[in-house]
Amino acid sequence: MAKNITLAIDEDLLDKVRVLAAMKRTSVNAMVRDFLEREVKREATQSSRAEAWSRVFETADNNAERRTPRLTEGEPLFDRELFYEEVMRERGLL
């Protein structure tokens, strides 16, 4: 069921909106209703995306915890120089 609402709009803005509505062959009421519907859908879509990304990050974090290598103290996780040497050897440059 449609409900009526009252809006306070600057007179100059209302005149411009009326002209715009006429150019689009619609009404100010329809323009306001369409705008509000779009905003609600956009917000719902953003919420859905945020929830989906939250699940992705949670899954990634959980998987990362299982894959985290157990290092001895002081041992680097990644040795850049060793990696560089391996790549250069594979390419026949060393």
Image (cartoon, rainbow, N blue to C red):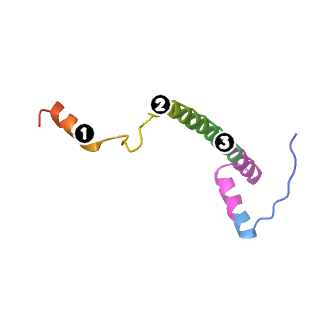
Looking at marks 2 and 1 on the same chain, the residue that comes earlier in the sequence is marked by 2
Magenta span contains residue 37: yes
Amino acid on which disc 3 is placed: Ser
Looking at marks 2 and 3 on the same chain, the residue that comes earlier in the sequence is marked by 3
Using the image, determine if residue 70 lies above or below residue 13.
above
Q: Which residue is mark 3?
A: 47
| Residue nearest the observer in this picture, 63 or 76 | 76
Q: Position of residue 25 (x, y in %)?
A: 68, 48
Amino acid on which disc 1 is placed: Leu
Magenta span contains residue 18: yes
| Residue nearest the observer in this picture, 30 or 6 | 6
The structure residue drawn at horizontal position 73% and vertical position 63%, both measured from the top left corner, is 14
Q: Position of residue 12 (x, y in %)?
A: 71, 69
Q: What crowding class fits label 3: few (fewer than 14 Cα within 10 Å), some (14-19), or many (20 or more)?
A: few
Between tags 2 and 3, which lies in front? 2
The structure residue drawn at horizontal position 69% and vertical position 48%, both measured from the top left corner, is 39
Q: Which residue is mark 1?
A: 82
Placement of the C terminus among the 4 image quadrants: top left
Q: Which residue is mark 2?
A: 67
Looking at marks 3 and 1 on the same chain, the residue that comes earlier in the sequence is marked by 3
Question: Secondary structure under badge 3?
Answer: helix
From the viewer's perspective, tell me whether residue 6 is left or right of residue 19. right
Q: Which residues are magenta?
A: 16-38
